[in-house]
Amino acid sequence: MRAYVYDDIPGDQRKPHDSGQLVTQDQLKELGVLYWQIPQKDGWEGEIDKVAKERDYKNRDIINVTREGLGEAYESKIKGFFEEHLHEDEEIRYILDGSGFFDVRDHTDKRWVRIAMDAGDLVVLPAGIYHRFTLDEQDKIKAMRLFKVRTRFRIPPRNHGGS
Ligand code: KMT
Ligand code: NI
């Protein structure tokens, strides 16, 4: 895991775009972004369970960002991930295989901080932070996504009938 200021030079999003200006773990913490490592070895899932319990996460899935993994949705997903967006709740990403970049907006909103993620890296994205994701030139990543809410869909309100 390595974080640095994105150079903002137009071109292939999968290239590193490394301005050479490092961003420290403390600086990321100021943005509410936490990161650490849980090595991909026996027992990793128990470690994830602990984090999920401590931070009150109720749901998770595994996403394989490859052509095979996403099928017909590949192009649209890749495009959507790289569009600046936010989540209503804190979310965690834990990398199982491959690599990729999470870009998060820093306080000034004027620059992107690029976080280069590899297998075993875990990042906590705070609620409401603007971010985006792209594959790198390795062109594949397998990640666990952890969510605080049990489903991503709202349960429709019960119809109590008229009266
Ligand atoms: C996100 O929130 O942008 C994502 O989950 C991207 C895919 S996870 C490798
Ligand atoms: Ni996102």
Image (cartoon, grey):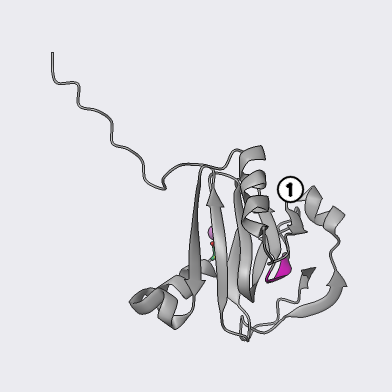
Q: Position of residue 143 (x, y in %)?
A: 57, 66
Up-down relation of residue 28 to residue 157 (above or below): below
Q: Give the main secondary structure of the magenta stretch.
A: strand
Residue linked to disc 1: 32
The boundaries of the magenta stretch are 113-119
Q: Is residue 28 visible?
A: yes
Q: Quadrant of ligand 1?
A: bottom right
Looking at the image, residue 157 sits to the left or right of residue 17; the answer is: left
**Residue pictured at 56% horizontal, 44% vertical:** 89
**Quarter assignment of residue 116:** bottom right
Does the stretch in magenta take in 140?
no
Q: Residues within 10 Å of mark 1 (few under 14, many from 20)?
A: some
Q: Position of residue 66 (x, y in %)?
A: 48, 79
Looking at the image, residue 124 sits to the left or right of residue 84; the answer is: right
**Residue pictured at 72% horizontal, 60% vertical:** 38
Q: Position of residue 148 (x, y in %)?
A: 54, 43
**Quarter assignment of residue 136:** bottom right
